[in-house]
Amino acid sequence: MSKPIIVNKFGGGILTKEFIPLMKKRIEEQVKKGNQSIAVVSAMPKVTDEILNFLSSLKENYDRKLIESFAQNLLNRHKQIVKDIQISKEYEDEVFTQLENVMTKLEDDLKIDHKKTEGKVGAVTNALEDKVVSCGEKLSAIIMTYYFKSNNLNAKEFIAEEIPIITDDHFKNANIDYLVSSRNVKNKIKEKEEVVVIPGFTGITNDGEVTTLGRGGTDTTACFVGAALEAKRVILWKDVGGVLSADPKIVKTAKTIPFISYLEAEEAGKIIHDKAIQYVKMHKTEIEIASIANPKLTTKIGEIKKKEKGAKIVSIKKDLNLLLITDEVIKVNDLLLLVCDIFKKHKVEMILVSNTRYSLQIVAEKNDEIEKVYNEIKSKVEKIELIKASMVFLVGNFEAKDVNDFNSLLVKLGTDLQISAFYFENCKRIEAVIRTDNIEKVVNNLYKKFIKK
Ligand code: ASP
Ligand code: MG
């Protein structure tokens, strides 16, 4: 019988000298218990951002020297990590050669493109960007593979191109072809004796072009691999203790929640990457968000087993933009159409929309383009106002009474309630838009009232 499989996702935030030894420890524990362990890794801290920033500057100033110095710098930093985490001397040459190979390829890719396009501004295409950005994950997967090896854990790296994890050609935000890729993963990886290390966030098109899966895409790779192999569990390791009932910087007594459903996790946001969750839902794979330092602090995410009532999480979104639009001539349908087009044009995301007969209230994300949206709508409607606001919300299972209590409390706290919460069937999230200078006080009051001790 084949062994149960555990897929571990190690994100950039914990790929540090302090936590890397703990990753080895967690994998070792799994292997000892008879599991097959897989590690899906992100790029080292800040590396993806740095590569992207470098590519932006290259778009404006396409300079060979810049490419060389950037590549050298990135290589040296990764070599330093190899030394910092004390990969044994026995492997040092090998690991350095492999890191150098990735960087040489990166330099070549950039320079070949430079030649082809004669260094024109804007020559960095999305396809080239993906090829280069994906190196971050490749470098860290090499390091982690050798780190495991040098600590007596037999490990082997499989990059997305050789598995292969096939995606469409939406560069920078590609989608995995599940049917083909899951078969490939099974063939390549199932029943491997070694700890399999996979660089996350990357894929390849049928035409052999490297793609990336969207920012934070290592979650997507991990959940995809978990689903493809029908893993017993996917563990997303963090430096904090699972999913907390509130931001501990605001609520001192915030605690780790033992269990939330897939739906609640989606409603809470920021827990698992949007694209990732579809895969684990498919085979009802259990997910765990666990603290790398203290694995007892963990939140399990799965199918609802028993119906629980009430709130589990209190959260906020600050610095949002609220547009209050009124027009007594344009019908609300047309008004909405008009407004949506303008939001779309400026790529500003709407978070919440509510309306009356002659008015629209739209909450939009924090985005500098909002001024343009505002000005353009202003030129077309009778009246518009743009104000800063915050959203407070609860995640859990709610009844109509909870929604009333929530709104009443916000009014009582003098929060200048702009959009109140409303009830709907099977309500998993209640949210309201408020204006207040003391959001901490509001959150603490909501916590006291709604979260069970
Ligand atoms: N390194 C990629 C990013 O920063 C993928 C990830 O971290 O999940 O977006
Ligand atoms: Mg990252």
Image (spheres, helix red, strand yellow):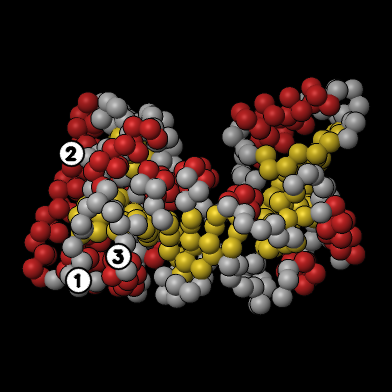
Mark 2 Cβ inside 8 Å of ligand 1: no
**Amino acid found under the numbered disc labelled 2:** Asp
Query: Does residue 246 sit above or below 158 in this rendering?
Result: below
Residue 371, quarter of the rendered image: top right
- Crowd tier of the residue under label 3, counting other residues whose Cα lies within 10 Å: few below 14, some 14–19, many 20 or above: few
- Crowd tier of the residue under label 2, counting other residues whose Cα lies within 10 Å: few below 14, some 14–19, many 20 or above: some
Could you tell me which residue is drawn at 68 percent across and 63 percent down?
A: 312
Which tag, 3 or 2, sits closer to the chain's start? 3
Label 2 sits on residue:
108
Q: Which mark is residue 34?
A: 3
Residue 346 location, x and y as percent? 61, 32
Label 1 sits on residue:
151
**Amino acid found under the numbered disc labelled 3:** Gly
Foreground mark, 3 or 1?
Answer: 3
Could you tell me which residue is drawn at 85 percent across and 52 percent down?
A: 400
Q: Secondary structure at mark 2?
A: helix
